[in-house]
Structure formats: structure tokens, C-alpha cells
Image (cartoon, rainbow, N blue to C red):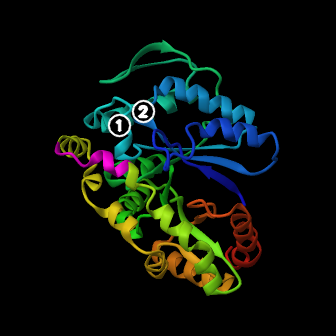
Amino acid sequence: YEYYCLIEHHFFENFSISANPLALFSAAAQRTKDIRFRTVCHTLPLHNPMILAGEIAAADILTNGRIECGIGRGHGWLYKPASIPHRESPGRYKESMEILIKAWTEESFSYEGEFYSVENVSVVPKPIQKPHPKVFMTGTGGSTFSIAGKNGWGIFLGGIAPFEAFDPGLQVYLQACKEHGTEPDFGYSRVVHIADDMDTARREAGVAVKKFFGLANEAMATLQDEATKESLIEGGYQFYTTDALLELGRMSANDIIDAGLVFVGTPDSVTQQLEDFHAKAGFNEFCIISAFGGIDTALARRTQERFANEVRPGFS
């Protein structure tokens, strides 16, 4: 495996996996030599970008230049408990992106925006990687993915939503890459579980698959009043005013597996599913989610080993 990903999540008991991925990466780096670490993603509107720039740079030093920086606006349910209006999300996101790059690449800089205003500030330390750690944008994208294409950044998609939810943003990204002469760098993540036969794979993964796809229910419950829905729309979070995530949570494990929203099966069947999905989506890297929904750690590790030894060799 080339990299390890972790999502920055806050506030919800059943959904929040890590409040500080950089701390975990810095600790894991002391026990590893080569694997890279990617946050997917830092929810930029929740952070002071000047502070975050220094924290990412410090983690880059502690990992000896192995940090990769995923950035996004995050889930719609994060803003109310963070005391940030949804309508401020797009502007904070754009300004934070610009400040991060300046902080990493300029000895000192000034910036005047609607939300952040600094004069002759120097962010220390600077990252080891030059000009800065690799940047990925996450989310469903829309027009913001054009920024990634223009700057030569990657995008990282996936999770529980179907590919069709991401495809419009992907097309924006690919078009921007074409217009600006940059190379597309497109990663995708999906749940994977491998066993000797399909019946065993379904039995082992079923409860965890169902739980994983229902993890958003607790958070979605905070978005159901009309005032919150209006706020979501103001911030461009229309997706969170629909029942799409709740409907995924209502699906049975077998329906989720049969719909191809997860790759569950034998090494051969998972290989075929991945080949078919690659032909459809065109990603250049794939991230497996093997520890999902409380599945037994031994089963997650077995999937990691079997994917590496029996599935990955078929892909260059």
C-alpha cells in the first residue's frame, strides 16, 4: 500500500472517526518508513488557515515529507455545532485555500479577504515538501473542482454515495485539467471485503455494511428543521436537504452489495468489480475501506492482505 487515509470528523458519536488525523499520522510515522499519509479531508471553513498551515507543515516534518493534504468544505451537519453559518462556507473555503498556499510558499505574506485579513505574517515551520505537500480536493465538487484542475491538484472521491453523485464534479475537473494543461490525478475509495466464497463474504460483511451506510443517520437528524434546510441551501449544501443519505441507510446489506456500492466477494469477483468500475470511472488510484461499520479487526486485516496479494497484482 502506498498511502493511508483518514477523515477529519467532529461532533457525532457514531460518525466521527478522528478529530485530528495529523496527530495520528505523526505517531504512525515513527513506526513506518515509506507509506504516505493523506487527510481526506481537512474541513477548511472550520479552521483558521494560518494555524492549520503550520500544523500541516509540522506534521510534514514529523513524517519526513509524507503528508498529503485533502481539503474540502465537509459535511453540511458540521457547521451548526461549529457555530459557523452555512452561507459563509464557500467564501471561507476559497480564502483558506489561497492562504494555505501562500503560507507554505512565501516567507511572509499579506492577505485581505472577507473572512481573513493578515498583514506581513510568516507561518512557521515550512513543510519539507516543496513547494508544498500534495493537495487533493474532496466532496462532490461542482465548480470548485475547476480550481483543482487549474492548479494541478488531485481530487479524491467515494465513500457511500454512488458514483453518479460525483460524476458532474469529476467532469468539471477533467475539463479544467484539459484547459490548463495539467495532469488529472483522481482517487476513489470504496468499501471492500474479501473472503473465500460469496456467501461467506456476505455473511461476514453484512451487519457492518448495513451499519456503515447508516452512520449518517444521527447527523442527518440534526438537519431536518426548515430553518436549517434554508441555511444549507444558502451555503450550497442542497444535497443535505434531500433524503439521499437516509435512503442509503434504509437499504439492506444485500441490496447495497448487489447495487455495487461496496465490493464484497472473492478475490476474483472483487477484481472484476474493480475492473468494471475503473472502466466506468477512470480513476488512477483506488483506496480500500476495509475497517468499516465495526467489522472485526481480524477480518479487516485479512481483506487488506488478500487485496494486496490477490487483487492488486492485476492492476499496474
In percent of width and height, residue 152 lies at: 50, 50
Is 136 situated left or right of 231 in this image? right
User: Residue placed at 37% from the left, 36% from the top?
Assistant: 94
Q: Nearer the viewer, mark 1 or mark 2?
A: 1
The 10 Å Cα crowd at callout 1, few under 14, some 14 to 19, many 20 or more, is many
SS type, badge 1: loop
User: Whole-Å distance between the Cαs marked 1 and 2?
Assistant: 8 Å
In percent of width and height, residue 287 lies at: 60, 62
- Whether residue 228 appears in this view of the structure is yes
Q: Give 154 or 250, whichever is nearer the viewer.
A: 250
Is 236 situated left or right of 26 in this image? left
Quarter-of-image position of residue 22: top right
**Residue contact between numbered discs 1 and 2, judged by CB atoms under 8 Å:** yes
Q: Give 131 or 253, whichever is nearer the viewer.
A: 253
Q: Please tell me whether residue 316 is drawn above or below residue 55 in the rendered image.
A: below
Which residue carries the number 1 mark? 79
User: Residue placed at 68% from the left, 73% from the top?
Assistant: 316
- Whether residue 283 appears in this view of the structure is no
Which residue carries the number 2 mark? 46
In percent of width and height, residue 242 lies at: 25, 58
SS type, badge 2: helix
**Residue type (three-letter) at the residue carrying disc 1:** Tyr
The quadrant of the picture occupied by the N terminus is bottom right
Q: Name the chief secondary structure element in magenta.
A: helix
Q: Give 102 or 232, whichever is nearer the viewer.
A: 232
Is 68 situated left or right of 141 in this image? right
Span shown in magenta:
219-226
In percent of width and height, residue 303 lies at: 70, 70
User: Residue placed at 54% from the left, 17% from the top?
Assistant: 108
